[in-house]
Structure formats: C-alpha cells, structure tokens
C-alpha cells in the first residue's frame, strides 16, 4: 500500500501536536514528584492514568471525525446520536439481569469484549440503516439520530428505576463521566482495541476521502459506499465503547475536538485529520487534567468544563448554520 504524501505544513502540524502531547505528558509524570520515597509506585499510578487519558482522548477524537464523514455534516457526533447511551443501556441491562454481584463476577476482559461486540452489531444495524443511503435529508437525519439517543437514555432511565435502588445508584455513578476514574483493569483491553481500530481507520483513510464527497460522487468513482459506511460505523462503535467504559459518556467533547481539528488542519484528507484529532483530544485531556487536578485541586471539574465548552460550540454551529 502506498503511503499518503503529507505536505510540509501538515507535517509541521502533526509534529507540533506530538511534541505538545509529549511535553504535557512529561509534566504529568514528573510534576510534584517527591525526591525520595516510593517514586516507582507513584509513577506507576500516574502512568496508568496518563495512558487512560490518552486512549480516551484519541478514541473520542477519531470516532467523531469518522462519524461526521459518514453523516456528511459537522454537527452530528456519536454521542449526540446516542452511541454512548447505547453502551450505558447495555450496562444497565446486564445489571438488571445479573445483579451487581453477577456483573462483578464476570471476567473483566470477556465482559468488555462482549459489550463492544454487541454494541458494534446494534450500531451497524441502527445507524447503518439511517446513514447508509447518504442521509440526503440532513435535518431529518439529525432529528432521527437525536430521537434514538433520547430513546436509549429513556430506556436506561426506565430500567434504572425498575431495578434495586442500590443497583440503580451504581448505574447512575457509571453513567456520569469522570476523568479521575480510569478502570485500570479495562485499560489493556481498551488500549489493544483502540490501536486496532485506529489502524483500521488509517487503512480506510483514502476511501474516507472519497466517502466525504457524497454518496453519488463516491459511487460514481467506484467506491462501495454501503460497505465502507458499515465498516466505518463498526470502527466508531468500538472507539466510542472504549472511552465510555473507561470514564463514562462524554457528550460534546468529540464535537469540540473535531471543530478544532478541521480549523487547524485545513484539509479534507483523513490521513491528516484522524491523527490530528487523536493528538488534539489527548493533549486537551492531559493538559486539562494536569491543570485542574495538580494546579487547582479540582479534578472533577474537567468533565464539567469540557461539556460546557462543547455545548456552547454546538449551539454556535447551529446558530451559524454550519450543518455541512
């Protein structure tokens, strides 16, 4: 396979983003490190959290760019369309059927892989039907996607009220995003799946460039449109399940990252957009958590600030009419 050519400007951009992420990662690992004592234990804890933040950020950013390409507009994101709500609904259904003790007794890796597999299948069926034929009517596509998201949240809320109150409290806690809560047991599985999905996305980069031209143009150029859409949605489902399992659902973060990526990259080539989105998202999370946790002592504020800023950006896009 021929490697895509990268312009000097884009090479500088990707190099700069990589160095910026490396700098904030070094600060995260070394800032406030005691000169003596059990430094290896502290570094191990910090490394686990740093790896989790990078995986969550990169997966969210790349998933959003992929989904916007399939949907054909810059407003839709997997979270707005209910992808993360679908994952939380699966979690609640498991708690309802097996109980907290039953869910806790399940092997972590097998449970996570099963959830990702079920979510990928359901996402391809639901959203593949919705977006696979080009989504020509953008307002109706947005409305349908939002309704699906509301449906998943409503079902999750209903099941949460049917189950035992203690189980409901556990479900509610897992339904709130927290970057301070990285499940170290899931991290190896999440990292492995994320790397595989990112490699798959990069292999589809040239086809995604054609897909972004629209269904009619893509088909006329010989692209197997439905096949590429299903493959992309499967990658999106995997990349959404990973951060949702590690930190909880994040609604507007991906939208904010995608907007920054398109603004900085100034290109439609996914060979540039995908790694740039991953680097920008990971840098934002590491830098934000470093600021709020180490400097301000308010670790829980990062998710609130990100959701607030992303919500404002979503309203800005709607008011400006940036549907495409």
Image: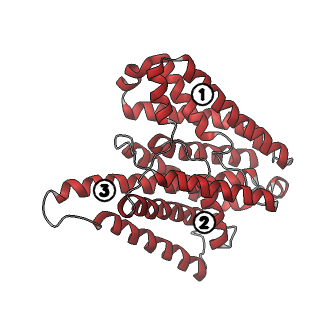
In terms of sequence position, does the residue under pointer 2 or pointer 3 come before the other? 3
The residue located at (55%, 76%) in the rendering is 13
Residue 95 appears in view: yes
Residue wearing tag 3: 46
In terms of sequence position, does the residue under pointer 2 or pointer 1 come before the other? 1
Quick one: SS at disc 2? helix
Side of 53 relative to 206 (left or right)? left
- Measured in 3D between alpha carbons, the distance from the residue under mark 2 to the one under mark 1, in whole angstroms, is 37 Å
In terms of sequence position, does the residue under pointer 3 or pointer 1 come before the other? 3
Image depth: mark 2 or mark 1 in front: 1
Residue wearing tag 1: 156
- Which of the pair 301/170 is nearer the observer? 301
Badge 2 density bin: few <14, some 14–19, many ≥20, Cα 10 Å: many
| Residue 296, horizontal then vertical, whole percent | 40, 61
Residue 74 appears in view: no
Residue wearing tag 2: 271
Image vertical order of residue 172 relative to residue 280, above or below: above
The residue located at (44%, 43%) in the rendering is 246
Say which quadrant the C terminus sits in.
bottom right
| Residue 221, horizontal then vertical, whole percent | 80, 59
| Residue 10, horizontal then vertical, whole percent | 59, 76
- Measured in 3D between alpha carbons, the distance from the residue under mark 2 to the one under mark 3, in whole angstroms, is 31 Å
The residue located at (47%, 53%) in the rendering is 301
| Residue 253, horizontal then vertical, whole percent | 58, 54
Badge 1 density bin: few <14, some 14–19, many ≥20, Cα 10 Å: many
């Amino acid at each position: 396979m021929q490697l895509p050519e990268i312009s000097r400007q884009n090479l500088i951009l990707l190099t700069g983003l990589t160095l910026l992420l490396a700098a904030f990662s070094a600060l995260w690992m070394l800032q406030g490190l005691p000169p003596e004592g059990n430094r290896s234990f502290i570094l191990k804890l910090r490394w686990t959290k740093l790896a989790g933040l990078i995986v969550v950020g990169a997966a969210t950013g790349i998933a959003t760019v992929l989904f916007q390409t399939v949907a054909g507009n810059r407003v839709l994101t997997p979270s707005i369309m209910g992808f993360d709500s679908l994952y939380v609904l699966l979690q609640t259904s498991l708690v309802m059927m097996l109980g907290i003790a039953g869910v806790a007794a399940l092997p972590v890796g097998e449970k996570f892989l099963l959830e990702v597999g079920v979510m990928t299948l359901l996402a391809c069926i639901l959203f593949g039907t919705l977006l696979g034929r080009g989504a020509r009517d953008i307002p109706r596509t947005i409305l349908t996607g939002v309704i699906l998201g509301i449906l998943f949240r409503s079902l999750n809320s209903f099941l949460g009220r049917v189950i035992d109150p203690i189980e409901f409290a556990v479900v509610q806690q897992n339904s709130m995003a927290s970057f301070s809560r990285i499940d170290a047991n899931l991290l190896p599985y999440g990292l492995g799946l994320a790397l595989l999905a990112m490699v798959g996305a990069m292999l589809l980069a040239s086809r995604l460039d054609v897909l972004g031209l629209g269904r009619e143009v893509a088909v006329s150029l010989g692209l197997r449109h439905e096949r590429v859409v299903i493959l992309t949605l499967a990658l999106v489902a995997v990349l959404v399940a990973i951060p949702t399992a590690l930190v909880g659902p994040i609604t507007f973060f991906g939208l904010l990252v995608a907007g920054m990526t398109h603004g900085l990259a100034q290109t439609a080539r996914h060979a540039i957009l995908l790694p740039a989105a991953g680097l920008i998202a990971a840098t934002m999370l590491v830098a934000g958590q470093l600021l709020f946790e180490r400097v301000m002592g308010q670790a829980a504020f990062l998710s609130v600030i990100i959701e607030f800023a992303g919500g404002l950006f979503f309203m800005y896009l709607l008011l400006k009419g940036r549907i495409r």
